[in-house]
Image (cartoon, rainbow, N blue to C red):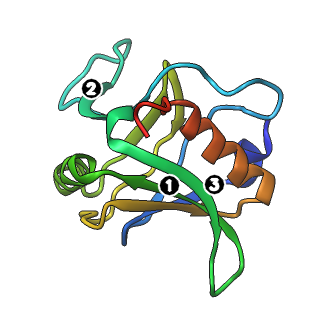
Amino acid sequence: MSLINALLSLLLFTGISAGNVSQPVDTQDTAPPTGQFIMKELKPAYAPDEDPWMETGLDSRHVKKADVQFSTFTNEPFVMVEFNYAGTQLLTEITTRNIGKPIAIFVGDELITTPTVLEAITGGAVQITGQFTIDDANDLANTINSGISPTDM
């Protein structure tokens, strides 16, 4: 089990929102997943053996970058994910209709994180915060960035 799995029972997904995470990808012993960044939302209804996630249209074309920053209050690391104009518009729509529900971030077919949306995020950037070590935050940022091709950035 990676440090991400072991240490992070709570992550914050903010523009001004907070949430929980489940089943992050174990990146400690493997290379980051390959494929593009994709944000998905829960289907309105699905069978127990069916994939519960559906595409939102928000993908690597809409993400500028992910990087590690530090809280000015606690000095703890967090991951900032920035979106372009079209991504900001999609993010606002997606988070508005998913308040109280999880949003999934995938890279390729790998589920990276599933923060729960507490309110609409309208500012074009989200923070994923938790009890990260610097290495955990770097792993998450690098995994997200691995899903953004240089032509998307």
Q: Which residue is at 48% across, 29% downward?
A: 149
Q: Name the quadrant containing residue 95.
A: bottom left
Q: Which mark is residue 9?
A: 3
In this rendering, position of residue 137 left or right of residue 65:
right
Label 3: how many residues lie within 10 Å, few (<14), some (14-19) or many (20+)? few
Visible residue check, residue 23: no
- x%, y% of residue 54? 27, 26
- x%, y% of residue 88? 25, 54
| Residue ID for mark 1 | 20
Residue type, numbered disc 1: Asn
Q: What element carries label 3?
A: loop
- Between residue 100 and residue 139, name the one nearer to us: 139
Residue type, numbered disc 2: Met
Q: Quarter of the image containing the N terminus?
A: top right
| Residue ID for mark 2 | 54
Visible residue check, residue 44: yes
Contact between marks 1 and 2 (CB within 8 A): the answer is no
Q: How far apart are marks 1 and 2 (CA)?
A: 19 Å
| Residue farthest toward the right in the current orientation of the protein | 29
